[in-house]
Amino acid sequence: MKPLQRILTEDGSYTLKREDLGETYHSQKGAITESEHVYLSNGFRYAVQNKNRIAIAEIGFGTGLNALLTALERHNGLEIIYYGIDTLPLDSSEMEAMHYERTVIHPEAAAVFTKIAHLPWQFGEKPITEAVRDGFQLAKIAVSVRNMQLPEKVDLIYYDTFAPKYQPEMWEPVVFEHLATQINPGGLLVTYCAQGKFRRNLQALGWIVERVQVAGGLKNEMIRARYPE
C-alpha cells in the first residue's frame, strides 16, 4: 500500500504526500493553482488553439486534478480524448478524499470528478475511452511509461511525475525517446520541472524547448517543449 498523507495546500485545495518519498503530488503553494498555471494556461489552452479535437496523455495521473480541470475547460465543438497513465494508481476513495468539488468552482465539478474517480483502471494494451463529460473521453491506464502504447498519437503531454530528485528513472532520456513515438509532430509536452539537465536532455533528443515563466506564486519557471514537425 502507498503510504499517503493528505495535505492542505496554500490555495485551500488538497494534495497527497508520499511519505516513502517525502514528496507531494502537487505544489504546496496550491494544488489547483499549479494545475491551472502549468497544465491549463501554458499547456492545454496553448495547444488547443484552432483545433476541434485534441488527444492528451497525462504521465502521472495522480489524484485526477489535471483531468478534472481539463474536462471542465472543454468548450462546445471541441472533442478531448484523454489518456491518464500511472504505475501506482490511486483508488476511487483516495481520489475522492481530495474533495475537489469544494474548491473547483464549476457547477459540474462534483459530477465529473465522481466519474473520473470511479472510472476503472485498465491494464490491457488497447485502452478504451469512456465519456465522463460531454465531449470529454477518458481512459485510466495502469502501465509504465516505457511500455505505454497508446491507440493514437497525442497532441499534448502533461508530464506530472514526481521530481527528478525523488524519481530519477522517470526523467531519463530513454523515457522521452519513447514519448517521441507517442506524440504527433508539432505536439507539446509541458511539465512543472525546469531542471537544466532535463532541459538539455530534451534538446539533445531534438525537442524544441522553451522555459516559461509561471504565475500564481509558484516557482519561477516551467518547461514547454515541442516535438519537431
Image: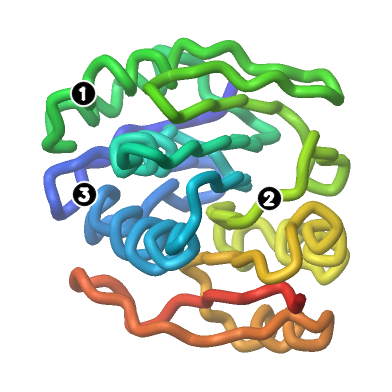
Q: Is residue 168 left or right of residue 77?
A: right
Q: List the residue tagged with mark 1.
A: 108
Mark 1, residues whose alpha carbon is within 10 Å: few (<14), some, or many (≥20)? some
| Residue 86 spot, x, y in % from top left | 64, 36
Quadrant containing the N terminus in the rendered view: top right
Identify the residue at horizontal 56%, vertical 62% (top origin): 163
Badge nearest the viewer, 3 or 2: 2
Res 154 label: 2
Q: State the separation of the CA atoms marked 1 and 3.
A: 23 Å
Q: Earlier in the sequence, mark 2 or mark 1?
A: 1
| Element on which disc 2 rests | strand
Residue 107, horizontal then vertical, whole percent: 13, 25
**Nearer-N-terminus badge (3/2):** 3
Query: Does the rendering let one see residue 15?
Result: no
> How many tags in the picture?
3
Relative to residue 195, is residue 112 depicted above or below? above
Specify whether 136 is left or right of 228.
Answer: left
Q: State whether residue 163 is above or below residue 64.
A: below
**Cα gap from disc 3 to disc 2, whole angstroms:** 31 Å
- Quadrant location of the C terminus? bottom right
As displayed, is residue 223 above or below residue 147?
below
Front one among 193 and 76: 76
Give the Cα distance between marks 2 and 1: 26 Å
How far from the left and from the top, in percent, is residue 92?
45, 14
Q: Which mark identifies residue 9?
A: 3
Q: Is residue 38 visible?
A: yes
Q: Amino acid at mark 3?
A: Thr
Q: Which mark is residue 137?
A: none
Q: Residue at image x 60%, y 45%?
A: 55
Mark positioned earlier in the residue sequence (1 or 3):
3
Residue type for callout 2: Val
